[in-house]
């Protein structure tokens, strides 16, 4: 029982990280109708920024985190402006290829500047492990990740549904032309979505690198792909879907690692995704997409 | 000077020339209707006026300001609202949220609340359904919502693209009554319609569009009795 609770807790925590990343995928998909495959690498940039701020600049942790978030936000907005905005209205395959190109660009820049070897990342979490009973101890990283994820999810849900900017994002996602007729600046709104998604990626990067205390140019790849799967799993374009998809994915992955096979855990995750998509092609909470011509 | 003055407008979709030198003007307080067959270019003109399309050449002056080079989201602020063809309400937002989106460029909470109450008075159906998702409204209700949403910006001029399209006769009458009320309350109206008879019956002046060009213009009263118009557009 103790070990089950512990696996479940770390599964929820991993799932929370996937969810934070998946939110970026799903919000960008919702508003810009594109898959931003460079999103995973933004996590890596966030991780490195925080790592360098702590080690090279000896910044305090809070400041390093802030720098990480700001750098990723700026990076996300810049990528959109330079690489994706000129392609608005272009075929989705061109946009997809561009996104993959940006992903490789970021990875290779990191390889060139920082080298390919993985560095030890000193956890940004200072909370001591929580001892529940003799056999059950939950790490500070797990606890903090779960709390941070829950707070962000609540804040984001309120932001999207209750604020003017959040509603504008929904309006632009639905119909850019009609949104413009309301006086909404579509370009600015899209930039804001990239900013939020990238800021969340930085937070995810900090939590990820603290939980698995390493950083390399490839740190963002696998979690990025998993989070993309989580977004599809939950219904791409749906914010609650990304949250649910991420959490489920993390829990399924961790429990299958613990009880079935650590080598097969990824295969199990993919199998679950395939089954879900066969039963419900739009994902768990996805809406039917009305393609507008 | 006219409130809205469109001069020698040319608009193309790639190689296809949709609008080939259209000029018209709308004076303050008027109801102007633009009629024409399917594909004549009515929607294209309205989209160009509110900035969703950029013209190849020509000018669009609204109270002396050039709109053809203005970003579309800034045009609402000048006092121009557009009820687009097919309503285009935000299906995933509630009726209330759609109306609030209409007031996006306004900031005074009390004044927005006041406008909201006025809209609810004009469209009681919307108030009854304010918490309902717009996508679940009937076609007629969506049209009311699209008009209410446009009015929430407190426009000086409202552009309407076939507001009676696809509605039952009862709703059509209601829509035209509302347009009359909007005009009576001091808002200038530019109305695009296929229902030429109804449109001419409430308009001051009309322009007849044929394949991207103005074929005829005049007082609505005269055009409604014009033989050519009767034959081509009124089915008589
Ligand atoms: N996106 C587009 N791409 C290419 N051609 C277009 C596009 N939109 C409209 N057209 C063409 O431009 C011309 C004018 O179209 P428009 O929609 O303005 O007509 P309309 O008068 O509004 O017609 P309706 O009464 O059917 O709404 C048509 O020939 C149409 O085929
Ligand atoms: Mg039309």
Image (cartoon, coloured by chain):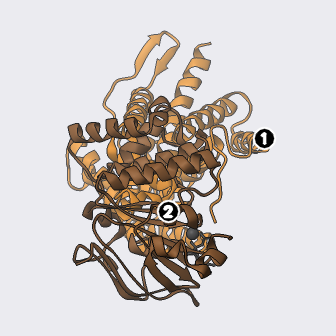
Residue A48, compared with residue A18, is above or below; it is: below
Ligand 1 resides in the quarter of the picture at bottom right
Q: Measured from the top left, where is residue B99 in percent x and y?
A: 40, 44
Could you say which is closer to the camera, residue B39 or residue A246?
B39
The chain containing the residue under callout 1 comes to A
Q: Position of residue B83 (x, y in %)?
A: 45, 58
Q: Is residue B81 visible?
A: yes
Vertically, is A170 above or below B44? above
Relative depth, front residue between A73 and B153: B153
Please state the horizontal and vertical placement of residue A109, each as a whole percent of the image.
42, 70
Q: In the image, which disc is placed on residue A174? A: none
Please tell me whether mark 2 sits on a helix, a strand or a loop.
helix
For the colour orange, the matching chain is A
| Total tally of numbered discs in the picture | 2
* Residue with the mark numbered 1: A275
Which quarter of the figure has residue B232? bottom right
Would you say residue A196 is visible in this rendering?
Answer: no
**Label 1 near ligand 1 (CB < 8 Å):** no
Residue A47 to residue A145: above or below: below
Residue drawn where x is 31% and y is 57% of the image: B187
Q: Residues within 10 Å of mark 1 (few under 14, many from 20)?
A: few
Q: Is disc 1 placed on a helix, strand or loop? A: helix
Q: Which residue is mark 2?
A: B201
Residue at 25% from the left image edge and 50% from the top image edge: B106
Quarter residue A230 falls in: top right
Q: Is residue A85 left or right of residue B208?
A: left
- Please report the residue visible at 79 percent of the width from the left and 39 percent of the height from the top: A279
Chain B shade in the render = brown
């Amino acid at each position: 029982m103790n070990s089950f609770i512990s696996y479940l807790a770390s599964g929820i925590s991993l799932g929370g990280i996937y969810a934070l990343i998946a939110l970026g995928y799903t919000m960008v998909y919702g508003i810009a109708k594109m898959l931003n495959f460079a999103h995973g690498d933004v996590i890596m940039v966030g991780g490195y920024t925080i790592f360098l701020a702590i080690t090279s600049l000896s910044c305090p942790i809070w400041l390093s985190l802030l720098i990480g978030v700001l750098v990723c936000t700026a990076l996300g907005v810049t990528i959109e402006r330079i690489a994706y905005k000129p392609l608005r209205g272009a075929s989705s395959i061109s946009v997809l290829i561009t996104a993959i190109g940006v992903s490789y660009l970021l990875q290779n820049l990191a390889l060139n500047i920082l080298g390919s070897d993985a560095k030890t990342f000193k956890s940004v979490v200072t909370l001591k492990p929580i001892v529940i009973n003799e056999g059950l101890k939950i790490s500070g990283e797990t606890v903090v990740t779960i709390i941070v994820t829950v707070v962000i999810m609540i804040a984001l849900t309120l932001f999207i549904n209750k604020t003017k900017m959040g509603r504008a994002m929904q309006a632009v996602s639905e119909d850019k032309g009609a949104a413009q007729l309301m006086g909404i600046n579509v370009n600015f709104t899209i930039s804001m979505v990239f900013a939020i998604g990238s800021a969340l990626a930085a937070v995810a990067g900090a939590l990820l690198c603290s939980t698995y205390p390493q950083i390399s140019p490839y740190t963002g790849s696998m979690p990025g792909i998993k989070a993309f799967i989580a977004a599809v799993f939950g219904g791409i374009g749906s914010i609650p879907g990304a949250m649910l998809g991420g959490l489920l994915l993390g829990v399924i992955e961790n429990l299958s690692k613990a009880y079935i096979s650590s080598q097969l855990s990824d295969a199990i995750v993919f199998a679950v995704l395939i089954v879900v998509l066969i039963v419900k092609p739009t994902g768990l909470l996805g809406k039917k997409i009305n393609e507008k011509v | 000077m006219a409130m809205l003055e469109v001069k020698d407008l040319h608009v193309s979709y790639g190689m296809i020339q949709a609008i080939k030198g259209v000029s018209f003007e709308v004076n303050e307080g008027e109801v102007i209707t633009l009629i024409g067959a399917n594909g004549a270019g009515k929607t294209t003109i309205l989209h160009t006026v509110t900035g969703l399309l950029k013209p190849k050449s020509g000018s669009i002056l609204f109270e002396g300001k050039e709109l053809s080079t203005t970003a579309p989201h800034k045009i609402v602020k000048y006092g121009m609202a557009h009820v687009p063809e097919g309503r285009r309400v935000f299906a995933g937002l509630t009726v209330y949220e759609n109306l609030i989106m209409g007031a996006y460029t306004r900031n005074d909470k009390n004044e927005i609340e006041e406008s909201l109450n006025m809209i609810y008075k004009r469209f009681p159906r919307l108030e009854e359904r304010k918490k309902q998702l717009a996508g679940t409204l009937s076609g007629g209700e969506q049209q009311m919502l699209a008009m209410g949403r446009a009015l929430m910006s407190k426009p000086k001029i409202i552009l309407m693209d076939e507001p009676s399209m696809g509605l039952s006769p009862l709703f059509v009458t209601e829509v035209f009554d509302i347009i009359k009320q909007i005009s009576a309350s001091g808002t200038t109206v530019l109305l695009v319609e296929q229902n030429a008879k109804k449109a001419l019956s409430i308009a001051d002046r009309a322009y007849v569009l044929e394949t991207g060009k103005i074929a005829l213009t005049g007082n609505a009263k005269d055009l409604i009795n014009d033989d050519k118009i009767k034959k081509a557009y009124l089915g008589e």
